[in-house]
Amino acid sequence: MVLKKAATVATATTSEKSAYGLQDWLRLIDSTSPEDRRLAARALAEFPVSAPALLNTLARESNIRVKGAILVSLQCIGGHRVLEGLLPFLRSDNAALRNGVIEILQGMPNEIGDYINDLLHDQDSDVRIFAIDILQTLAHPDSPTWLLDVILHDKHVNVVATAIDRLTEIGTPEMLPAMKSVLARFPNEPYIEFIVNLAIKRLSED
Amino acid sequence: MKKILIVDDATTVRMYHRQLMESLGYHVEEAGNGVEALEKASQDTYDLFLVDINMPKMDGYTFIEEIRKTPAVKATPAIMISTEETESDRDKAYEAGANFYFIKPVRMEAIQTFTKLLTGGAE
């Protein structure tokens, strides 16, 4: 059956939209109309097979609302393939995209656990900081151990500072000696001194 | 007393910068992301924004671009403070409309000097 389609999805009736299938939405994700692309991105959440197309579109999409719709659909689809497709965006020059990806990865605790250790040992200190940002709201039982390893071994002051910031919330009193050792590793760093003392105070109160 | 809005998603960073600014005699308020900061900026008058780049909901570049488009706050100076170390990050900050760009951890003397310079002092 050949269906007559409206010129744009935005002007289509509900019954016309219900006739759209995977191929229609994949065609519309490349539309020149941002509203069509947004609607297509949302609709493709129902089709896990569309994940590679959504990831490709995310890389070149400039409209912030379309980007948001793509990220939400990718989160709905989920799984390791989506997660592996999202990880390269942590190296994007686009801060809004990076932060959007971090928020999506925070919502994938079952999948991200397998990758976080590699991210925490990435050569790029910014990626290591983003990995700690992902752990910020990720309810993963290994988070305190991962962060403890960072404060004991990472050489970059901002990575260590970010990890201490998180540990002030989820650390335990057993981590106090490790916290104190950071002061010796980064002498003459007033911010490190400030947050370590804050963390020691909070953990001592526990 | 002049007023500074610190925009950063890390609580400890906000606390640290608050301490630095209050020691100079400024009144300090805080926002955890760009959206919250825009809301505060629309309701109150600030003499300086201290802004991080990577934050949920709205990043620092976008926040500064937005305030530069808003007549009531477009002239308010903004210092961007971030862990991002590359030239392109610095360039993007200035293109967005930042007055200065500092890489964390910022030397206390540096941030205090530039804050005084941009606000003309706390009083």
Image: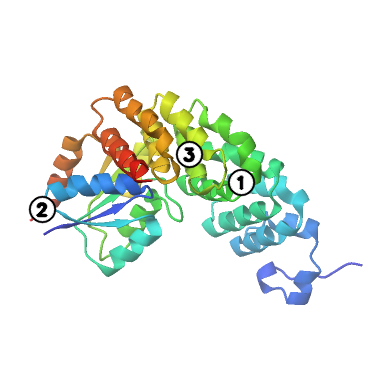
User: Between disc 3 and disc 1, whose residue precedes?
Assistant: 1
* Circle 2 residues within 10 Å: few <14, some 14–19, many ≥20: some
User: Residue A132: which numbered mark, if any?
Assistant: 3
* Circle 1 residues within 10 Å: few <14, some 14–19, many ≥20: some
Is there any visible trace of residue B99 in the rendered image? no
Disc 3 from disc 2: Cα separation = 35 Å
Q: Is residue B50 left or right of residue A33?
A: left
Q: Nearer the viewer, residue B60 or A29?
A: B60
Disc 3 from disc 1: Cα separation = 13 Å
Residue at the far left in the pictured view: B123
**Residue type beneath disc 2:** Ala
Q: Which residue is mark 2?
A: B122
* Circle 3 residues within 10 Å: few <14, some 14–19, many ≥20: many
Which quarter of the figure has residue B108? top left
Q: Are marks 2 and 1 in contact (CB under 8 Å)?
A: no
Above or below, A150 relative to B36: above
- SS under mark 1: helix
Q: Nearer the viewer, mark 2 or mark 1?
A: 1
- SS under mark 2: loop
x then y, percent, for residue A154: 43, 25
Residue at position x 71%, y 73% in the image: A12
Q: Which residue is mark 1?
A: A109
**Residue type beneath disc 3:** Ile
Mark 1, chain letter?
Answer: A
Is there any visible trace of residue A52 in the rendered image? yes
Quadrant for the N terminus of chain B, please.
Answer: bottom left
